Image: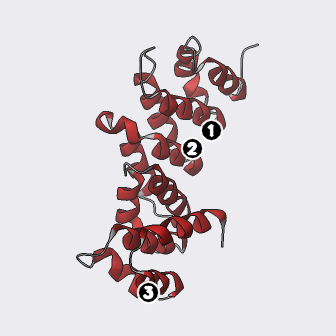
Amino acid sequence: MDEEFRSLVDRLAQEAGEPAAYRGLLATDDHEELARVLVEPDRPLWARELAAFRLGCDGDRRAFETLVLLLNHRDPERCVSAAHALARLGDPRTPRAAAALATNTLRTAYALHPVRLLTTLRAPESVPALMSTLGRLLASDEPHWRVALACVEGLGLLGDRQARPVLEAALPHPRLGDAARDALSRLPGQRG
């Protein structure tokens, strides 16, 4: 059991008011049973999350829609679990969905985990989405500076020289300057 699965199991054990149902979903290896949980009416969120996480980590693409919804959830722990499963799912729709969530101006407060997932995925959509999101978060009074910081760090890890202008624009920002300097130092052809 990896660390992320153990964390999910501990969190959902407390949330599940139905210990037998919880233990059953945890124990089953039947992907059909897990997939039914995603579409059956009146299933609690903990059950859908557990089923989607297990299916996603096993590469079963039926979990995709549920995991994307959880990636955009108001509960950060659900977002972390969804991002972990989406990174392992291998669904070609994942980068586009993560980019849409990261760049949605109405959901910026929930963009941290989609931004981090884009960095992990290293997909063609990653750099443009991180640049776009960072570019609109550079105002000094921007309340979502943690999302901006994740963009800066992600762009540094991705090491794409296209990011130079937006990273240079982040240098004067008090909360982003150090990370922007570090990110710029990782870009190919860094000017001394």
Give the number of the mark in front: 2 or 3: 3
- Number of marks present in the image shown: 3
Query: Which residue is at a point 35% across and 67% down the rendered structure image?
Result: 45
Query: Comparing marks 1 and 2, which lies closer to the viewer?
Result: 2
Q: Quadrant of the C terminus?
A: top right
Q: Residue at x 62, y 22 (%)?
A: 180
Indicate the amino acid at tag 3.
Ala
Q: Nearer the viewer, residue 174 or 105?
A: 174
Mark 3, secondary structure of its residue = helix
Distance between mark 2 and mark 3 Cα atoms: 38 Å
Q: Which residue is mark 1?
A: 158
Residue 174 x, y percent position in the rendering: 57, 14
Badge 3 or badge 1: first in the primary sequence: 3
Alpha-carbon distance for marks 3 and 1?
A: 44 Å
Is residue 116 shown above or below 22?
above
Q: Which residue is mark 3?
A: 20
Q: Name the disc covering residue 119, or none.
A: 2
CB of mark 3 within 8 Å of CB of mark 1?
no
